Amino acid sequence: MKAVVFDMDGVIFDSEALAIEMWKVVADKYHIPDIEILYKDCLGTSEVVTKEMFLKYYGQDFPYDEYKAEMSVLFHENAAGGNLPQKPGLKELLKYLRSHGIKTAVATSTIQETALKELEEGGLLEYFDEIVCGDMVNRSKPAPDIYLEALRKLQIEQKEVLAIEDSYNGIRAASAAGLRPIMVPDLSAPTEEMKNLAECILPSLNDAKDYFRNIIGQKLKKQITKSDAVALTHNGKFHADDVFSAALLMYLNPEIRIIRENRVPEEFDGIVFDIGRGTYDHHQKKSRVRDNGVGYAAFGLLWEDLGWEILGAELAEQFDVSFVQPLDNNDNTGDKNELASLIGGFNPTWDAEDNNDTAFFQAVSVAGLVLDHKFERYLGNERADKRIDQVLEKHDMELGSLTDEDRRILVLPEFIPCQKRLSETDIAFVIFPSNRGGYCVQPQKKEYSMNYKCCFPSEWLGLESRELAEATGLKSAGFCHKGGFLMTTGTLEDAEEACRISIRCFSDEPVIVNLGGGEEADFLLRQLPHMKNSRIQHIALPALPELETDGIYGDITLDKPQWKAMIKDQVKKILKYKPEAVYVEGNVFETYPVVHALRKKHIPVLTVVQSDKKKMIMRIPSGS
């Protein structure tokens, strides 16, 4: 793959939907029937061909030019000045292709003047190497002329060029020109003809990026896994970015040779990362940034192309968010990251005489161990989710024969990590065989909460052996942890009965801590779903510590350990109530330190916002 050619209307711009809406306005005004059906048949064709099709359908006396002019006025009133909506994922796809040296072009039936204006207003001209328009060729789509002209300008063989189209006529034209068409449907659903002509049919441009990424990733992996594979990065001081990049390459090929230099030799034809301003470097002026604003570093750029091969698309995306992005962000911004600091600590001291490369590869070996364990953990969790789904499916088939209590008890054939998956269900307890013999019982937490759906009776906590057997009435009861998160029994029957007793004895009174708010907040909090009967526990905001002042500026007299101890004590007071959530109200100085500490413990934090003159309770999202 050396180039990708884009249709414009319906692929780059979401213009087809707007055009058809404007045609419907004109049709309603002049009572023109079947306008939507006819317009869809015209998709992808030039203005000349569209007019011919209208006249053929409505008759030669149909005032097409008059109606089209009126439609155009309405269209441009809505689209002018860059207001024409772009398809989701467009710019990220274009940036991705260009960063990988893939040429891009436009092949549109729209006339050149209009096409250039719309692309310029949309800030897109810089992303395309060539632009071919309808008035630059003799025949419109479905004839291949536009694509043949694009090939002539690109100077690339047909088999190396893919075309993205949304219309039947566009797919026909690209196929006839010998390109590899990809259909991303807009207004026209794919037919059998389209399935036969297109290399593939994809739901969106985001999916197109994934498709191209797989092509590029396979090529990169082939290069990495060659017997004589070689890669190059910068020498001197190293960071987590280049270290984990090297570890990733060595995960795929432990024998790859990694060279460290201060520049890329002209004749070098291996993989280059974190140097050279190429595909896997991020030091150039217009380096790529993710949709969420986190910039790519070398590790992220390599992971983007290789991660799906290691973990699969879904897990690779999760790993990018949780592991790769924090390291990328650290390298781009200096934002604190403990793992990055640990890796950076392998650098020799300023006055050391040791070889810097030796320290680099020591760090790479540690990073490699981290990746090995992380990958196995992610794949293990995926296997666990599939296994627990099988167990749940069997459990659900038996629901009709179970009591209400037993429906909330899930017996596992073996230990399976399932806390997160089961938080979404009504399952309150799981039972599984203990590796020490007998059975373990674990309560399950509520979704978005640190609290259990059901707890063991408080008088069981911390007991074991005979004391626990007497308290529970269960002969084989062995141990109940004082924290309430585990109980053991000798038999499955006693494990199940322990769950039933706990369910019968349990009464749930959800608690919301109101930190700094008043009765107005209480009224709103009681209107939250499932919180009508909750108990609201008021806690005052911490008193302002002693200040040193200089005019209007003040600074606290506490040193850092004292400040941290004060916040820790405040959080401890809150958590002793085991709240479902904490509502916070007050100024930033009073609330931010506590909110930050609570979010680190994954406690839902609520606050009040005003929307359309209406006060609403909002949960502060993770990562805030």
Image: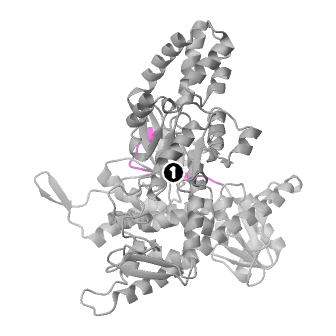
Q: Nearer the viewer, residue 558 or 466?
A: 558
Q: Is residue 586 visible?
A: yes
Placement of the C terminus among the 4 image quadrants: bottom left
Q: Nearer the viewer, residue 358 or 217?
A: 217
Residue type pointed to by label 1: Ile
Residues rendered magenta in the picture? 508-522
Up-down relation of residue 185 to residue 456 (above or below): above
Q: What residue does disc 1 label?
A: 512
Which quadrant of the figure has residue 295? bottom left
Up-down relation of residue 199 to residue 29 (above or below): below
Q: Nearer the viewer, residue 286 or 179?
A: 179
Mark 1 surroundings: few (<14), some (14-19) or many (≥20) residues within 10 A: many
Mark 1 secondary-structure assignment: strand
| Residue 46 position in % (x across, y down) | 56, 27
Is residue 521 on the magenta stretch? yes
| Residue in view at x 64 percent, y 39 percent | 171
Which quadrant of the figure has residue 193? top right
Up-down relation of residue 96 to residue 20 (above or below): below
